[in-house]
Amino acid sequence: MTPADPVRARLSRLLAEARVESAALQRIAEEMARYRTDLDAVMPARPVLALVAVDLHDYYTAAEALFERVARLVDGDVPSGLDSHRELLEQMAADVPPVRPAVLSDDQRRWLHELRTFRHFFRHAYSVGLDPARLREHADRLLVRHPGLLEALQRFLAFIEETRDALAPS
């Protein structure tokens, strides 16, 4: 066993887990696209509002799970405490030479921050109704920005794969 083997194993694990989270992001975005027009009704049905809200929640949660894996397996540090969710997004938008490039652009970080804020609202606003206009905004933003997020993740994972392969014994 070489000294690089544990690092290679961690990077391989990250790649495998990231594929699962990326597939979840894709599945959620495809589902959102299928029923997005249902939000355009004068008063969308409560089940439609609930489904959109759950998918927005799940999309951010899947993205955050991937970011936590990067923080743990590559950076070696996952933020904790009251601001940990915001700090994790900032960490993913940071370039950390020579360890890794930024996972997210600053624009993607801002968008995901908005989605994170919605997730927090959704988790804690038990007695507040869901605003169809606000859900439309979040759904439309997700559908527009999802392809760019997937591209950013694929670029980052290609970097991780190259790094892992460069550590292989020759």
Image (tube, rainbow, N blue to C red):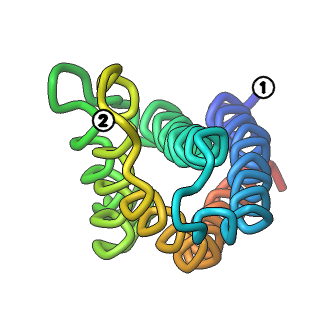
Q: Nearer the viewer, residue 161 or 16?
A: 16
Q: Residue at x 70, y 44 (%)?
A: 21
Give the class, few, some or many, for how many residues have Cα within 10 Å of label 2's Cα (few <14, many ≥20): some
Residue closest to the far right: 170
* Residue 166 appears in the rendering: no
Q: Which of 77 and 89 is in front in this view?
A: 89
Q: Quadrant of residue 138?
A: bottom left
Give the class, few, some or many, for how many residues have Cα within 10 Å of label 1's Cα (few <14, many ≥20): few
Q: Quadrant of residue 97?
A: bottom left
Instruction: Please determine whether, in this image, residue 123 is positioned above or below residue 16.
Output: above
* Residue 152 appears in the rendering: yes
Q: Position of residue 111 (x, y in %)?
A: 35, 66
31 vs 11, left or right, is right
The tag earlier along the polypeptide, 1 or 2, is 1
Q: Which residue is drawn at 53% across and 67% down?
A: 42
Q: Where is residue 124 in the image (x, y as percent from the top left)?
A: 31, 23
Q: Where is residue 146 in the image (x, y as percent from the top left)?
A: 59, 70
Element carrying mark 1: loop
Amino acid carrying label 1: it is Met
Instruction: Indicate the quadrant containing the C terminus: top left, top right, bottom left or bottom right.
Output: bottom right
157 vs 68, left or right, is right
Confirm or deny contact between disc 1 and disc 2 (CB under 8 A). Answer: no
Amino acid carrying label 2: it is Phe
Label ID, residue 121 = 2
Instruction: Indicate the quadrant containing the N terminus: top left, top right, bottom left or bottom right.
Output: top right
Question: Label 1, on which residue?
Answer: 1
Q: Which of 42 and 164 is in front in this view?
A: 42
Q: Residue at x 68, y 71 (%)?
A: 37
How many labels sit on residues?
2
Q: Residue at x 18, y 20 (%)?
A: 81
